[in-house]
Amino acid sequence: MQLNSLPESELFYRIQRLLAGYCQCIDDDRLEEWPQFFTERCSYRIVAQENAARGLPLAAMSCDSRGMLHDRVVSLRKANIYEVHTYRHLVSATVITEVTADYARARSHYAVFRTRTNGVSEVYSVGSYDDRIVAEGSSLLFAEKLVTFDTNRIDSLLATPL
Amino acid sequence: MQLNSLPESELFYRIQRLLAGYCQCIDDDRLEEWPQFFTERCSYRIVAQENAARGLPLAAMSCDSRGMLHDRVVSLRKANIYEVHTYRHLVSATVITEVTADYARARSHYAVFRTRTNGVSEVYSVGSYDDRIVAEGSSLLFAEKLVTFDTNRIDSLLATPL
Amino acid sequence: MQLNSLPESELFYRIQRLLAGYCQCIDDDRLEEWPQFFTERCSYRIVAQENAARGLPLAAMSCDSRGMLHDRVVSLRKANIYEVHTYRHLVSATVITEVTADYARARSHYAVFRTRTNGVSEVYSVGSYDDRIVAEGSSLLFAEKLVTFDTNRIDSLLATPL
C-alpha cells in the first residue's frame, strides 16, 4: 500500500483508527499487545515539552525496538504490584503533516486521566504525539512515536505508557 | 441501509456524528430529546470499571426502553431544582469492532467536565462507551449503550446522563 | 469550491483538519499565525455560557477583523513576559449543522489544559465552538467563531486564545 495513493480523508481515518486502537490497548491494560502497534525496529521517545522547546535532545525514555518496548512492559508488570490505577486516553486534533509513498507523519494532542482506587479522576498527563506511520500489509504501524509531555510529574515515567 | 455495505471510513463518520450529537444533546440540556438517540427497545447500562474488570454484572443503572430513559429525564428535572451545573462531554478514540448488515459495534473513550456556579471546571467522569448501533431509515441509533466509568463518585448517578 | 458539493464525510474531514490546525497553532505558541485561520473580515467572539443561556449578548471579547486578532496577539506578547504556561487544546464532538454552497456551520466541544512551570496540568477552560466556515481557494477558514466558555475564571481573558 502506497500511502500517498490514498485519499487524504481515507488516510486520516486509518490514522485515527491506529491512534484509537493504541489508546484502548493501553487503557484496557493489554500492555503485552502494546509493542505490536510499532514496527520491529522503531523509535519510541518521551521528552519534556520544556526540553523540546529549548532544542535539548534529552529523552526521559527512549526505545528503539519492539523488544525494548516488551521489556518495559515486563518491568511495569513487576513494579506495579501494589497499586492499581485506571488510565483513560483521549486523542484529538490530529494533523497529517507529510505523506510519501512510504510513510505519513501526523501530529496529535493527547490527554490522559488517571483514576485511583478512591474513585477520583485527575489530569495525569497532557501533551502531543509526533508520529511517523508506515504500512505493513493492510495495517498501519508506528515507525516513530515522539511523546512530548507538558505535565511534569515525578511519577509519570514509572507508570503506564503514554 | 446495510451497514456492512458502507465503506468503513463512511461508517466511521456516521458513528462520529451520532456520538457527537448525543454529547451535544446532553450538554445543551436538551434532555427531553436524549431518548431519541436510542431505539424504542434498547439497553442503556452504566457500570463501574472495577466491577466490569471483575466480571460482575452489577449495573449502577439499567434501562431497556426509550420510555425508561424518558422517565429518568423526568426524575432528573424534578430532582435538580436547586443546583445548576454545566456538563461538557468529549468523546475520542473510537474503534469500530464489528460490522454486520444489521448493526455495528464501536468502542470509544469519553471525558465529562462539570462546571459549578462558581465557574470552576473539574473532571467529572471518564470512562468508555461500548455501543451497538443500528440504522433506522437514514439515521443511526443506539440499540445498546454500555457506559463503563472509571470515576466513582457518589453523586454521579443523580446527575446528567453519561 | 462549493461546500455543499462535497460528500459530508469529506467536508467533515476538512473541518476537523481546520480545527486541529487551529488548536496546534495556539498550543505551539505560533500566535502570529493564528489570525490566518480567519477570513480578513471575520467575527471572533468569546461569551460566557451563563450569558449565552440567558440570551444576553455580552461578549467578553469581540474582534471583527484579522487586524484586530493580530493586535490581540501583540498585546499578549507584551503582557505575558513574566510567566510561562503551556496550553493544550482538545476538540471533539463536531456536528455539521448547516451546509450551503458558500459556507458550513459546525459546532464542537473543546477542553484546554494549562500546565504551569511547576509541571502540574489543570482544566483551564471547557466550552463549545460555533463556527461558520468558508472556503478560500483550497483552504477552509473561519468567517465566524463563537467561543462559549463554561469555565469562568478571572484570568482566562488575559491569556492565550481559546
Image: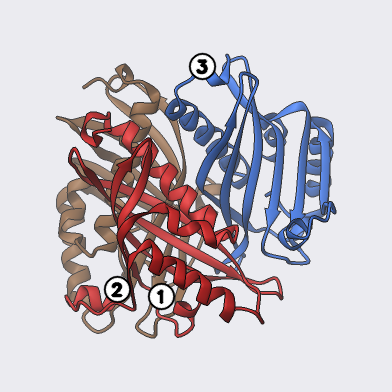
Chain colours: A blue, B brown, C red
Residue C108 rendering spot, x and y as whole percentages = 34, 54
Question: Which residue bears the numbered disc 3?
Answer: A5
Residues behind callouts 2 and 1 on a single chain? yes
Cα–Cα span, label 1 and label 3: 44 Å
> Which quarter of the figure has residue C146?
bottom left
Tell us which disc is closer to us: 3 or 2: 3
Mark 1 and mark 3 in contact? Answer it, CB < 8 Å: no
Provide the chain ID for the residue under circle 1. Answer: C
- The residue sitting at 14% across, 52% down in the picture is B67
Tell me which amino acid carries mark 3: Ser
Give the structural element (helix, strand or loop) at label 3.
Answer: helix
Please tell me which of labels 2 and 1 falls first in the chain: 2
Taking C52 as reference, is A158 left or right?
Answer: right
- The residue sitting at 57% across, 46% down in the picture is A108
Question: Which residue bears the numbered disc 2?
Answer: C49
Residue A107 rendering spot, x and y as whole percentages = 59, 43
Residue A28 shows up from this direction = yes
